[in-house]
């Protein structure tokens, strides 16, 4: 499993606190040079048992095809080239429309087989407030171009839980997204993070966080509509048509080893975690080992985010029986075969349930 962080954007979203810089040709070239060097240096760390490649960001779609090709050739040179079981590229809809069909066809020729489109919303007023570069029409155009290029595994990202997102606008957004017939939808509740523009607005009294009941209502509506449309709710924030669950992200939740490359990227060896410094040039690499207790907590936390849940023997060996029994009596935990899981109607409060277990 390989994750590559592309730390460039054309503009910064109101809510985003990820490490990213404004995309400039010189900076992108330096980034590619350093990334290819890092691939060669860390090649032996890469575990190809799952064989996935994920370009995230930032905005990977700002990468010129020449730079993307160099990166892929370097992976191939080091014995980690395609074809990949899953090769995902995160894309901004505006980049897709601006670069057009030839660009998408080139991505397909390079081995990309899954596209993740960052819609976030399909309401123009909200998109403007988010400082997104596209509007609703351009998002739909981007989706149609991706289909025209022959991609049959397309995911859409959406955000809910904003105090300025009405239930009507949210329902319209879900309906418009479903009308496009994507294979996968990821939906995230807005969180106010770090040094984002939104964090400063909250601090200055220019924004008020959405009440929990509004967020819960929007989440419940989402679950209901996507279930009716034939989607499987396989992870708290992720829904897929059968057979289109994200392979790479599934590896994260199963705690499979992965190597993260590029500034601010994180890695997991199976026993410890490491991360690259959040700077564009000359970033350092740091590591930390996980204690036995850390591993237990992480295994429970990640597994219980999924519909598959956690192995029953592992759960009972690491959680107090009285807590497990109480949560089962409350309907917050159910047993399916040899595994325990949080039922969908309790996914929204899963963090609280997991805290009570561990």
Image (cartoon, helix red, strand yellow):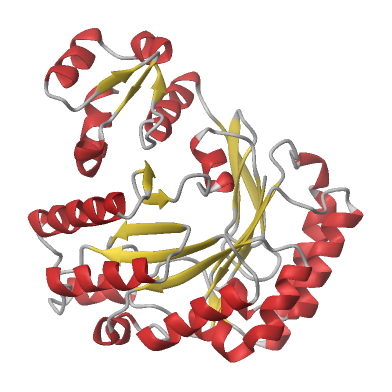
Q: Say whether residue 25 is left or right of residue 358.
A: right
| Residue 231 pos. (x, y %) | 37, 50
Question: In this orientation, does residue 282 appear?
Answer: yes
Callout count:
0
Q: Residue furthest right?
A: 77
Image quadrant holding the N terminus, namely top right
Q: Residue 214 sits in which quadrant?
A: bottom left
| Residue 240 pos. (x, y %) | 43, 50
Image quadrant holding the C terminus, namely top left
Q: Compared to 351, does 144 lie above or below? A: below
Residue drawn at point x = 52 percent, y = 79 percent = 144
Q: Say whether residue 172 is left or right of residue 130.
A: left
Q: Residue 76 sits in which quadrant?
A: bottom right
Residue drawn at point x = 45 percent, y = 57 percent = 184
| Residue 27 pos. (x, y %) | 69, 81
Q: Nearer the viewer, residue 234 or 279?
A: 234
Q: Compared to 90, does 127 lie above or below? A: below
Q: Compared to 20, does 218 lie above or below? A: above
Question: In this orientation, does residue 135 appear?
Answer: no
Q: Residue 329 sits in which quadrant?
A: top left
Q: Nearer the viewer, residue 50 or 175?
A: 175
| Residue 227 pos. (x, y %) | 29, 49
Q: Compared to 43, does 332 lie above or below? A: above
């Amino acid at each position: 499993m390989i994750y590559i962080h592309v730390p460039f954007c054309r503009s910064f979203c109101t809510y985003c606190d990820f490490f990213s810089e404004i995309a400039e040709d010189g900076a992108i070239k330096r980034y590619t040079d350093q990334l290819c060097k890092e691939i060669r240096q860390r090649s032996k760390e890469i575990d190809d048992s799952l064989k996935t490649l994920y370009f995230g960001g930032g905005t990977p779609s700002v990468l010129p095809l020449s730079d993307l090709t160099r990166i892929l050739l370097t992976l191939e040179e080091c014995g980690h080239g395609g074809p990949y079981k899953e090769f995902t590229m995160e894309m901004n809809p505006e980049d897709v429309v601006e670069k057009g069909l030839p660009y998408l066809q080139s991505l397909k020729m390079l081995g990309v087989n899954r596209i993740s489109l960052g819609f976030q919303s399909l309401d123009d007023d909200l998109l403007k407030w988010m400082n997104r570069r596209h509007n609703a029409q351009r998002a739909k155009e981007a989706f149609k171009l991706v289909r025209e290029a022959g991609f049959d595994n397309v995911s859409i990202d959406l955000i809910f839980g904003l105090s300025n997102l009405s239930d009507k606008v949210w329902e319209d957004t879900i309906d418009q997204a479903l009308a496009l017939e994507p294979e996968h939808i990821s939906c995230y509740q807005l969180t106010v993070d770090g040094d984002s523009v939104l964090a400063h607005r909250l601090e200055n009294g220019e924004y008020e966080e959405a009440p929990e009941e509004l967020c819960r209502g929007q989440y419940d509506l989402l679950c209901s509509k996507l279930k009716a449309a034939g989607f499987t709710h396989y992870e708290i924030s992720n829904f897929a048509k059968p057979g289109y669950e994200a392979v790479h992200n599934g590896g994260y939740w199963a705690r499979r080893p992965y190597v993260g490359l590029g500034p601010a990227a994180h890695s997991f060896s199976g026993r410890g975690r490491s991360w690259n410094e959040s700077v564009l040039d000359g970033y350092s690499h740091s590591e930390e080992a996980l204690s036995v207790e850390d591993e237990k907590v992480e295994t429970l936390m990640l597994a219980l985010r999924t519909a598959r849940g956690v192995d029953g023997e592992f759960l009972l060996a690491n959680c107090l029986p009285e807590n497990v029994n109480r949560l089962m009596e409350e309907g917050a935990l159910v047993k399916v075969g040899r595994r325990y899981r949080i039922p969908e109607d309790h996914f929204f409060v899963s963090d609280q349930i997991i805290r009570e277990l561990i």
